[in-house]
Image (cartoon, grey):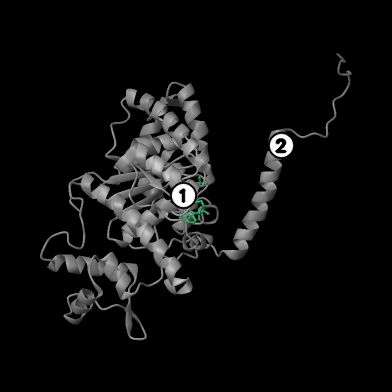
Amino acid sequence: MNEIPAGPRPLAIPSTSEEALRRSEKLGDALSSLLRSSYKPHERKTLRLFSAAEAASFLRTTPTNLRQAHNQEKIIEVSTKVSGRRMYSSSEIQTIRGQLEKTAKSKGAYLKKRGNSPMAVVAVSNFKGGSAKTTTAAHMAHKMALDGYRVLACDLDPQGSLSALMGFNVEIDFEGTPTLYDALRYGDPIPFDDCIYETHIANLHCVPASLELQTFEHETARVLANQNTWGGKAVVPFYDRLKQALASVEDSYDVVIIDCPPQLGFLTMSAITAANGILVTCVPGMMDVHSMNSFLRMAGDLMEVVEDNGGKDGVDFFRFLITRHEPTDGPQIEIVTLLRHLFGSDVLTNTLLKSTAISDAALTEETIYEVDRSNMTKSTYDRARQSVDACVEEVEQLILQMWGRNG
Ligand SMILES: Nc1ncnc2c1ncn2[C@@H]1O[C@H](COP(=O)(O)OP(=O)(O)OP(=O)(O)O)[C@@H](O)[C@H]1O
Ligand SMILES: [Mg+2]
């Protein structure tokens, strides 16, 4: 075998890490200037107004009942009318909900309260990228808030996609302001409450994430290597940190929705520990189901360790949600049939249909509740809206069961 000749090695080849960092810096700078040129800092999202039919559906009533309530002056008058028709803001819908509930014959007709039951914490999870975790989490958060629940959208993904859908452009809005990482970090964590922000939707608050959250993964590895200490001091174990943070705001919210990152790291495990409901999103494709199988096996193994350390009891519900569903696609039909056969009622009856209405809304970082039906093909919008509404309502029923309510 020939020996490598002695002498200086060529210097021109940069290491992989140098290459990656150099490219990331270049891309980061370009993206940042692109973002800044199209985005005005502190320009907050606003929510469109809703028609009487939409407001009535959020209020669990009919447009006729709503009109009568206005005529009888049981509820406030709206501030905007378009061509004589009432248009409702999310905060007006909320005020009206309170007024209707006060005079309702049966309690909870317009607002289902959780009473003394625990806050619902739903983790949307799967390590397969692009399985519609964020889309599902955002639509659940928006609809449940419009339906009158006090909702906290918790972004556990350093990519910050859920934060963007909640109106926070993290890398611009949050330079120097607290995000979830600041409440979870091991060194001098701040109160969780200080990382929560109001959104453009009444009743909906958000804990945004930034890239810094990724640090939690490395820091946790260090803490574990040092017998659960940081800087020489014992710390709350990684799996309990989010759970404890959420417990501190238990009185302020009915539902917490956690968007997990596409990996089974410490962040996802914290979400699973904190959750009393788990939703695994699944695109019905062969590769996706294969990957989901690995996710379930690994999650099971890892959670066993957490359970053995007393970190977790059972969950109230664990369900699969079929996403980006194309009901007429042959291969998808086979996989959906297989999943339903294997998991029965653990697969939600409703599915999140693949729709250009949803992907088009996502282009402007919006959900289907934010975009205006009049700007889309009506039948496309209605089909997508019905599908999303039905999925979220099915999860809502599980939450109501958890609270001992019959729906
Ligand atoms: N029902 C749907 N119809 C059409 N497009 C969809 C639908 N659901 C999600 N998408 C699109 O699929 C892409 C991936 O969705 P999303 O970001 O929600 O997945 P994710 O699981 O959160 O991804 P990641 O693993 O990167 O966090 C997005 O572009 C989204 O707009
Ligand atoms: Mg996501």
Quadrant of the frame with the N terminus: top right
Q: Is mark 1 within 8 Å of ligand 1?
A: yes
Q: Which residue is mark 1?
A: 132
Q: Visible in this render: residue 190?
A: no
Q: Is residue 74 left or right of residue 212?
A: left
Residue 372: x %, y % from top left? 43, 71
Place residue 146 in its image quadrant. Answer: bottom left
> In the picture shown, does residue 82 fall above or below 396?
below
Q: Is residue 134 left or right of residue 122?
A: right
Residue 18: mark in rendering: 2
**Residue closest to the eye, 20 or 86:** 86
Q: Is mark 2 within 8 Å of ligand 1?
A: no
Place residue 186 in its image quadrant. Answer: top left
Using the numbered discs, state the Cα–Cα distance from disc 2 to disc 1 in whole angstroms: 33 Å
Residue at position x 21%, y 65% in the image: 98
Q: Residue farthest to the bottom? A: 83
Between disc 2 and disc 1, the foreground one is 1
Residue 201: x %, y % from top left? 37, 63
Query: Secondary structure beneath disc 1?
Result: loop
Question: Looking at numbered disc 1 in the image, what kind of residue is underneath it?
Answer: Ala
**Residue closest to the eye, 58 or 35:** 58
Residue 167: x %, y % from top left? 46, 59
Residue at position x 47%, y 71% in the image: 377
Question: Looking at numbered disc 2 in the image, what kind of residue is underneath it?
Answer: Glu
Within 10 angstroms of label 1, few (less than 14), some, or many (20 or more) residues? many
Residue at position x 40%, y 60% in the image: 199
Q: Is residue 407 left or right of residue 258?
A: left
Q: Residue farthest to the top? A: 1
Residue 395: x %, y % from top left? 31, 50
Quadrant of the frame with the C terminus: bottom left
Q: Is residue 315 left or right of residue 107?
A: right
Residue at position x 35%, y 54% in the image: 391
